[in-house]
Amino acid sequence: MTTHADLVVVGAGIVGLAHAAEAVDRGLRVVVLDRDERAVGASIRNFGHICLTAQHGDALAYGLAARERWLSLAAKAGFWVSEAGTVVAARAQDEVAVLAEFAQHRGDQVRLLDANGVRSHLPVISDEVIGGAWFPLDLRVDPREAAPALAAWLAEQGVDFRWRTTVTGVESGAVHTTRGTVTADNVVIAVGHDVDRLLPDVAEAAGVQRCLLRMLQVSTPDSIKIAPAVLSGLSMLRYAGLTACPSAAAVRERITRADPALLDVVMNLMFTQRPDGDLVIGDTHRYGLTHDPFDDEPTGDLVLRETARLLGVDRLTVRARWRGVYAASERSEFLIATPSPGVGVVSVTSGIGMTTAFGLAPTVLDSLGAP
């Protein structure tokens, strides 16, 4: 086993794997440490949605760069990727206005659709839909396949994975674990919402909390194929590119009057279809440092009700339920810190790790002076 590496990555989720992949491209010797025997966190509990178009600023730049990396790595590592894009289904005139404004800023990244145009992409959708937009650059992967496939491919490239290895401390030049110490020229700590377990001062300074999601897997009505990811008017209140449109305020005002319960649970009504045909639906958001372990049924019922309404069906059959957890901060979409020389901390504190990690990794390694 390697006792010294050019780079040690702590955390084998998608953000950690992105840094390992970038380091491999740079010809570095890499060790990846993870406390579990495989990725089981946010990297496999998500929609598999590379939702780059709806981002803004640095997140958009990272997402555009990450898109090319996803396509390249899918070919190398042999996992499925879809280029069917994203459809935003609008059910009110104020939502149509947001999409029109967004299209003015983004040009060919946004294709406006009338109601029939939406239905040409979505064979099942509510009669309430009056228009929408297609984001052709967005991608989809199966997160339950992609993360393991990436780890397996990286191992074939010589990355030394140490599973079931808990990190107990990090300092410049060394990472201490339950299986001994690994020395390194540089260290990247990519443990998501658990950054406070290793570096509580860094997490507190960045305002890092845990965002708890409620998500479900349901059968697809009539086993219909739905190629793109699907967003709704509630998504216009979640993604920075859309919330930056002044017209988005009218959407929030209407929903506040008509159905404030949706805002109380901070719902982003959306879904993607898995390769096995089922839909992944969600999601709601709750923020805190430590969450109670009890899930309330009304929140899950609300997600089911609103998804059925968006699809225009009477009911949905639940296959599975789960809670996702990711790092969140009101101060920034990304936590990037250097608490000591040669030690970098990175966490995507906005729920867009799948979208941005592969674009973010070069910036973090450059900040450490990695060759």
Image (tube, rainbow, N blue to C red):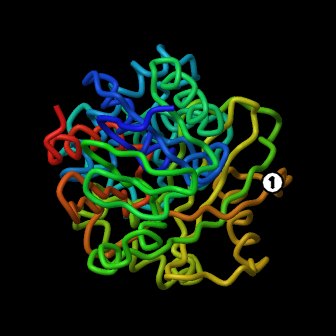
Q: Residue at x 44, y 57 (%)?
A: 176
Q: What residue type is disc 1 on?
A: Ala
Asked whether residue 136 appears in the rendered view, the answer is no
At which x and y percent is residue 315?
83, 57
**Mark 1, secondary structure of its residue:** strand
Quarter occupied by residue 335: bottom left
* Number of callouts: 1
Left or right, 216 with respect to 167, comes to right
In this view, 290 is above or below 229 = below
Left or right, 144 with respect to 111, comes to right
Considering depth in this image, is 133 or 141 the residue closer to the camera? 141
In this view, 89 is above or below 298 = above
Judging by the rendered image, the residue that carries numbered circle 1 is 320
Q: Residue at x 27, y 35 (%)?
A: 64
Location of the C terminus (image quadrant): top left
In this view, 141 is above or below 233 = above
Q: Residues within 10 Å of mark 1 (few under 14, many from 20)?
A: few
At which x and y percent is residue 210?
49, 73
Considering depth in this image, is 181 or 64 the residue closer to the camera? 181
Quarter occupied by residue 369: top left
At which x and y percent is residue 75?
48, 14
Considering depth in this image, is 169 or 272 the residue closer to the camera? 169
Q: Residue at x 61, y 45 (%)?
A: 39
Asked whether residue 294 appears in the rendered view, the answer is yes
Q: Residue at x 71, y 52 (%)?
A: 312
At which x and y percent is residue 97?
31, 57
